[in-house]
């Protein structure tokens, strides 16, 4: 009876357990983890008690089956809540074996697919975000040798795109899907922008840049594209200018400078630089061609060779250089008097097409030098007629006026010397007049014979002496005729000074003595009067004439003392 009672109690408890299982399975809010653990524990205890009490096996089997179904349903819900894909697969297999309703299985499978899609999307987002950051860093440190690092990986982008599409189809959280779409759009813009950077289509780059700006990609990509756009504009400018036959050199210079500054590395920059150097070389050459400086043109030609200016242009400049050298050499050699050098330069100048008038001037210079040479030989011969003939010829060929004037002076000096010889030479006429002597002296003096070296100076000095003698003799004769004691005294003194023969002075001295004796009293009276006075000049003259007529020395001494006193006073007054 006790055993039956225990069985009855266990059966009732088992039935109550069944009801709780049904309530859990069919509950409107599904399993609750914090409550279910206690229920499951009590349910399992009830099953064990019923099994131990020998409760009907059918009831036990039904209760165990329902418990298994509940546990399977609970495992599915737990896996769904934890988003554990592996756990969900196990739970769904368990639920399928436990004969859980199809609706729950379908829902579980859908949740598992959704979870897989979400996980894939999250992984794709993480990998794509790393790729975006890596490309941004590479772009910031971009070099020509690392261009492959600047393009987002297409495989990563495709994975993100597919994951986003699957996630959206499986109704993964829209925020996550939108985030993936935004990141994919950014990567797509970065890729398109970089591909446009590598091309030469400025319009395509502008369009890609506009899209990128709308999508608000990282600034480093925008800056790189903006720089490339500026480079493409520079490249377009260079293409435009280089397509012109004769571009403006300043515009080309600005375009090359701008391209260099913006880091253009295309071949067009090298072509533009080469073209600019050639144009500069041509411009310098053209400027130098307008110059008459050999040095300037030589440097311009050297620079033009370095700048690879067209050969034909350089050859034209070289012909001009040959011309200038020949012209310069001709001008320089004409400053000298080497006929052979001038003739050689004339030949070179003719070959170099130096203008005929310059060559004619050189020929004229040759004739002048030759005429000058003949003139010098004639001057050395001192043949006046020959010199004058050569002077006429030299004048015809334009010999310098200075040289002709020098030659004329020498001719006049030769003539002057001949005149001097005529009045004082060994063969001179002994009765030559003073007028003839004075004429010869004055002429010789006017042409500078007195300043010459050699015989000219000797004859000139002799003529001067002869003129002085003849003038002194003339004054003696004139003073003797006048009977003026003062004049006669001066004439005698002068004659003695210049060396007039004594026999020519004796008569004048005799006449002076006679006049002195007669005039002595008056002279003495004059001397005394002068001593009494204060006129130093009068006193000096009186002393001189008094001594000449031998006035008493005592009176003369008084006069000299008084003259000394007067002169002392005068000096003090001064």
Image (cartoon, rainbow, N blue to C red):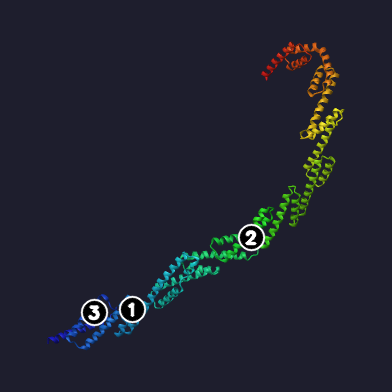
**Tag 1: Cα neighbours inside 10 Å, few (<14), some, or many (≥20)?**
few
**In x, y percent, where is residue 278?**
63, 61
**Tag 2: Cα neighbours inside 10 Å, few (<14), some, or many (≥20)?**
some
For the C terminus, the quadrant is top right
The residue lying toward the viewer, choosing from 329 and 324, is 329
**Residue that mark 2 sits on:** 305
Query: How many labels were placed on the picture?
Result: 3
Identity of the residue furthest to the front in this view = 426
**Tag 3: Cα neighbours inside 10 Å, few (<14), some, or many (≥20)?**
some
Is disc 3 placed on a helix, strand or loop?
helix
Is disc 2 placed on a helix, strand or loop?
helix
**Residue that mark 1 sits on:** 86
**In x, y percent, where is residue 264?**
54, 64
The residue lying toward the viewer, choosing from 293 and 520, is 520
Answer yes or no: is residue 237 visible.
no
Question: Viewed as shown, does residue 172 lie left or right of 228?
Answer: left
């Amino acid at each position: 009876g006790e055993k039956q009672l225990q069985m009855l109690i266990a059966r009732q408890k088992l039935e109550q357990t069944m009801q709780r299982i049904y309530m859990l399975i069919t509950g409107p809010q599904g399993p609750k983890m914090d409550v279910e653990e206690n229920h499951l524990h009590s349910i399992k205890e009830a099953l064990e008690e019923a099994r131990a009490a020998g409760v009907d096996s059918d009831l036990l089997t039904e209760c165990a089956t329902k418990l298994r179904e509940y546990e399977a349903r609970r495992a599915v819900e737990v896996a769904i809540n934890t988003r554990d894909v592996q756990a969900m697969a196990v739970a769904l297999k368990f639920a399928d074996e436990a004969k859980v309703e199809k609706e729950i299985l379908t829902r579980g499978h859908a949740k598992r697919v959704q979870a897989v899609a979400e996980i894939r999307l999250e992984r794709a987002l993480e990998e794509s975000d790393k790729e975006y950051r890596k490309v941004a860093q590479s772009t910031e440190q971009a070099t020509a040798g690392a261009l492959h690092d600047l393009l987002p990986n297409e495989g990563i982008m495709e994975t993100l795109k597919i994951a986003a599409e699957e996630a959206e189809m499986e109704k993964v959280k829209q925020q996550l899907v939108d985030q993936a779409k935004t990141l994919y759009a950014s990567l797509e813009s970065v890729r398109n922008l970089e591909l446009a950077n590598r091309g030469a289509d400025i319009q395509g780059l502008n369009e890609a840049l506009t899209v990128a700006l709308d999508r608000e990609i990282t600034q480093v990509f925008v800056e790189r594209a903006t720089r490339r756009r500026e480079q493409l504009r520079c490249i377009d400018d260079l293409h435009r200018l280089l397509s012109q036959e004769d571009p403006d050199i300043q515009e080309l210079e600005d375009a090359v400078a701008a391209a260099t500054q913006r880091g253009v590395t295309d071949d067009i920059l090298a072509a533009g630089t080469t073209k600019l150097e050639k144009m500069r070389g041509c411009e310098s050459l053209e400027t130098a061609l307008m110059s008459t400086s050999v040095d300037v043109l030589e440097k311009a030609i050297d620079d033009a060779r370095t700048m690879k200016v067209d050969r034909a242009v350089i050859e034209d400049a070289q012909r001009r250089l040959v011309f200038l050298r020949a012209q310069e050499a001709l001008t320089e050699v004409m400053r000298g008097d080497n006929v052979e050098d001038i003739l050689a330069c004339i030949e070179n100048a003719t070959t170099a097409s130096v203008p005929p008038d310059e060559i004619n001037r050189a020929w004229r210079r040759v004739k002048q030098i030759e005429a000058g040479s003949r003139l010098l030989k004639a001057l050395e011969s001192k043949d006046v007629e020959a010199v004058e003939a050569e002077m006429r010829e030299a004048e015809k060929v334009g010999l310098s006026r200075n040289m002709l004037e020098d030659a004329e002076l020498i001719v006049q000096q030769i003539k002057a010397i001949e005149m001097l010889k005529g009045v004082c030479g060994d063969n001179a006429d002994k009765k030559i007049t003073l007028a003839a002597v004075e004429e010869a002296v004055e002429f010789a003096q006017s042409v500078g014979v007195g300043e010459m070296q050699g015989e000219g100076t000797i004859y000139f000095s002799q003529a001067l002496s002869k003129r002085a003698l003849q003038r002194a003799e003339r004054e003696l004769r004139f003073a003797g005729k006048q009977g003026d004691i003062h004049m006669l005294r001066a004439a005698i003194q002068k004659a003695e000074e210049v060396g007039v023969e004594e026999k020519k002075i004796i008569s004048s001295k005799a006449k002076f003595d006679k006049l002195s004796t007669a005039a002595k009293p008056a002279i003495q009276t004059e001397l005394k009067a002068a001593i009494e006075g204060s006129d130093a000049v009068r006193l000096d003259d009186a002393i001189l004439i008094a001594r000449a007529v031998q006035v008493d020395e005592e009176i003369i001494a008084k006069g000299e003392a008084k003259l000394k006193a007067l002169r002392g006073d005068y000096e003090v007054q001064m």
